[in-house]
Amino acid sequence: MVVDKKEFYTKDDLKKVIDHAIGQNRLDPDDADFAKQIALFTSYYRQNIQRFAEDYLGLRLKRFQKFLLYMIHNHLYTLLVMTRGIGKSWLIGVYACCLAILYPNSEIVIVSHTLRQSVNIIDKKILLDLCKKSKRLNSEIDKVEKAHNNMILKFKNGSTITPAVSSEASRGIRSTCLIIDESRLVNNDVIQSILQPTSHPRQASYMDLLEYSADNYNIESSRDIYLTSAYFKVHPLYAQYKDYLAKMVDGKEYFACALSVDVAVNNGLLDAKRLEAIKSQPDMSQVKYAMEYETIFYGESEDAYFNLQEITSCQVVNYPFLLADNTDHRKGKEFKTNPKKLPNEIRLISADIALMAGNSNDASAFILFRLIPNDKGRYIRQIVNIETFEGSHAFDQAKRLKQMFYDFEADYIVLDCIGSGVAVYGHLCRLTEDDERGQTYRAFKVFNNDELEGQCTESNALPCIYAVKGNQQFNHDCHTRCLDMIQRELLQFLVDTEIGKTNLSSEYQFDAMMPSKQANMLSPYLQTERLISEMINLKTEVKSGYIKLRETSYVARKDRYMSLTYGNYYATELEQELNTGSDDDLWGSIWN
């Protein structure tokens, strides 16, 4: 039967059909108008899917959720950039269920960067939440097939919801609706070469009837839905968002929308006090907050010295070198993902020192470097952990440097020996009692400056400190060397925090850990994000032929960056020894 919408769209008929549908009585198959009523019911709710969620499934929706459901369903291509805490996984679960019920034989595939995340949308959002709130949804589901940490949700009308991972493992999975969750973490090549080629129109049974056999008659195009938080402008996601916006304005079947944290707060999904607590978290930078909560795509400043795209290309290190706290250290705990030291590897810790808290630019930053020689006589510099301290006493910082030195099996410490660094060095060149660990550390001393070396009176001091004192030439060289190593991709950083969390979850029982343990393991990734934020917010000035980098008001600090440049500078000096086998003139003209 071909449905003529104009014949059925009357107010009285609609009221009658909807009252039947959402009331206690089912539509009567023996009624002469049964086919007409079903056609009207289906047509109406297919055009108003948000009302189907409320009227038929009995779900209570916020106004913005109704709007999003309507717009998603009335466009073939959707990109939603949404704040954390707004419930995007729950909302997409609602949409997937409505689509599955209203369109028999739908093949809905939910893709994430991990299979676990995709499964969670079905398991936690649909089965454990939505099914408890809607008896009708329960009645529409036929069964759940589970196998090998995966599941498929099957409906009585032939529709399915299937989780998938963004990898070769998803090759061959067919879909009529492709939902890509946290799309910024999903490899775009996987989407284009593996997932989209197997998208196809829904194979409705009525299409086999003779009257629907005409070419392209009522063919339903497949749908693509992207859900994500905002990210850096250099990511392909930003170009995709602008493209969707332009096509939407041009009246094409595209919908793009960004919902900031204000929407979540105004709708009671996130309270203001909780939001303030999130803002004040030590690992929440302004840039991170802007992207994840204000849905702002962030890019480097116009006159930035470093290019964000070049930096993100260097984010290739999957695991940090994790440092045990004092309790775990006493227990002898080791982290299985910590890399073993290679035969020709050199490890160093760079330290930019500050002692007094209060100023936005006053903090000490310790960075762990792995220097791994390649076949071209250069060192690959891997940044595997970062720690920062504000307002710490010189003794405490010296003790922490020694703890890290032995835990990391370091060879050198590159120390800022101007101002506050001198006080820290004064404690480094003495025996250090570590009451928490029950150890006494030997004295360390400088080996590249006679004056500082002479300040150490311990005869058994370990000559492992390379001292730096900044001046115009030295700072200029630090900046240019750092940029050069990034452009050569010899300076490598940890991957994005979400990818890092996934990596750690695959190796440890991460979700079962105490929050403090989780925070310790994620800290290197978060600190890397802050380092990158510092770098892309440094403006370039040239004075008397020397490059000077200044902070912006948006990220008014550069302690991590300066520590990075110290370590990288010394790595370049060590490369001379790697190539010549001699340490002649190894220290350059730093002290001249």
Image: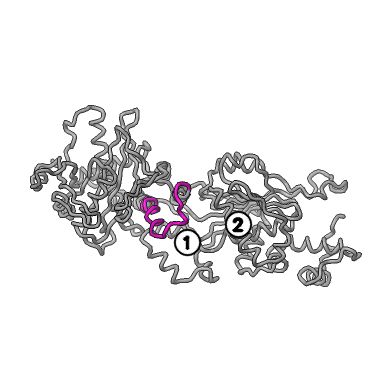
Q: How is the image coloured?
A: one colour
Amino acid tagged 1: Glu
Asked if one can make out residue 107 in the rendered structure from this viewpoint, the answer is yes
Answer with mark 2 or mark 1, whichever residue precedes in sequence.
2
Residue at 58%, 48% in the rendered image? 149
Res 6 → quadrant: bottom right
Q: Number of marks in the image?
A: 2
Q: Quick one: quadrant of the N terminus?
A: bottom right
Image-based side of 207 in relation to 336, left or right:
right
Where residue 493 sits in the image (x, y, percent)? 38, 44
Q: Is residue 324 above or below residue 481?
A: below
Image-based side of 115 in relation to 518, left or right:
right
Q: Look at the magenta stretch and give its main secondary structure.
A: helix
Disc 2 vs disc 1: which is toward the camera? 2
Which stretch appears magenta?
Answer: 506-528
Q: Mark 1 = which residue?
A: 294
Q: Which element is circle 2 on?
A: helix
Asked if one can make out residue 252 in the rendered structure from this viewpoint, the answer is no
